[in-house]
Image (cartoon, rainbow, N blue to C red):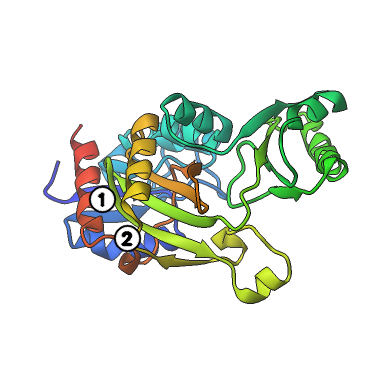
Amino acid sequence: MSDTVRLAMTTRAETFERVREPLADRGIEVGHVRAKERSIRVAGGHDTADRTAPADFDVGFVYPSRLMEGAVVDTRLSVPWVNGRDAVLASRNKAGVLARLEAAGLPVPRTTLVSNPVDESVVVDAVAGFEFPVVVKPNSATRGVGVAKATDLDSLLGVVDYLNLVHDYRATGDKSYLIQEFLPDARDYRAMVVDGEYAGAVRRTLPAEALAAGRWKHNVHRGAEANGVDLHARGRALAERAAAALDIDYLGVDLLETDDRLVVNETNARPTVDAATKYEPGFYDRLAGLIERVAEA
C-alpha cells in the first residue's frame, strides 16, 4: 500500500463533501463510487469508465445502503469496509438493535415488534400495557420515513391498515413494524462514536413554527435543526456502550432524554457527518485512524 490511503465513499451527499478535505490533510484520498441510480456491468468484461476496480481503492466507507447493488460494488472493489454489510444490516434492524442493547443492560424504550401478516387482535394484544400515544415505525426504514404517532387504538389500527397494504406487496422485503412508547418532550441527541470512543454530538430540535403546527419528529431530513452540544458524561458513556454492544466501529447513536430517563432510541451505521465544529477537536484524527486501521487489516 502506498503512503496515501485511497478511500472509496459510496455517497456523494453532505458527508462526501465535508470529509474530503480534512481526510486529505491526513493522507487519505477520498474518491466517489456511485452505487445506485446507474448501470453497473456485472459480467462480460470491465467497464473502463467505471471506477470500481480493486486497484483504485484500499478501503471502503461505508457499505452501500442498497444491498443488491452493494454486493456487486463490494465484489468489484474487493476492499475491507469501515462498517461492512453486517454492520449496516445490524443497525438497520431497529428491533434487533433494541433487543441486543437491552440484553446488554442498556436502557431502551419499551417496544414491541409486529411481523405481518397478523390479525387485528394481535395488534390489540401487542399494544396492551402501553399508554397512548404510541409511536409506530417501520422496522428498517430511515430518516423518519413512515413513522407515525397514534393517539388511541382506532388511530393505531388506521396506521396499521396502511402498513398492511404496503406489506401485502410481495416485493416488500421487511414486513415488520414497531409499536413503541412515546416519550413526550424528550431531548433528542445524535452522538457519534468512532472506533469505540465518543466523538461529538448534536441536539436535534424543531423550529418554533413547526412545534406550533403540532410536529414532533426531530429528523433533520424533515426540517429539524442539528446544533452541536457538549453532551454530558452519561450520554457519552451510553453511546460508547451501544457501539460496543453492537460491535460497530463508526456509529450514530440516537438518544432520547427526559427529566428522569435516558435511552437509546435507534442507531445508524451510515450516519451523516455534520460540520466539524459540532464534534470533538480530534474527530477527524480518530476517523482517519480508523480508516487506516481497516485498510491495513
Q: Nearer the viewer, residue 144 or 242?
A: 242
Q: Secondary structure at mark 1?
A: helix
Q: Nearer the viewer, residue 36 or 178?
A: 178
Position of residue 131 in the picture relative to residue 98 (left or right): right
Q: Are the residues at dot 1 and dot 2 in contact (C-beta closer than 8 Å)? A: yes
Q: Residue at x 48, y 48 (%)?
A: 254
Residue position marked by numbered label 1 in the rendering: 287
List x then y, in percent, for residue 293. 19, 39
Q: Secondary structure at mark 2?
A: helix
Position of residue 288 in the picture relative to residue 135 (left or right): left
Q: Residue at x 72, y 41 (%)?
A: 131
Type of amino acid at the residue the image marks with label 1? Leu
Q: Nearer the viewer, residue 285 or 207?
A: 207
* Label annotation for residue 19: 2
Relative vertical location of residue 51 with respect to residue 116 in this rendering, above or below: below
List x then y, in percent, for residue 244. 33, 33
- Badge 1 or badge 2: first in the primary sequence: 2
Quarter location, residue 93 = top right
User: Count the marks: how many?
Assistant: 2
Tell me if mark 1 has few (under 14), some (14-19) or many (20+) residues whose alpha carbon lies within 10 angstroms of its own: many
Q: In the rendered image, is residue 83 in sight?
A: no
Type of amino acid at the residue the image marks with label 2? Val
Q: Residue furthest front?
A: 260
Q: Quadrant of the N terminus?
A: top left
Relative vertical location of residue 137 with respect to residue 219 in this rendering, above or below: above
Q: Residue at x 22, y 60 (%)?
A: 24
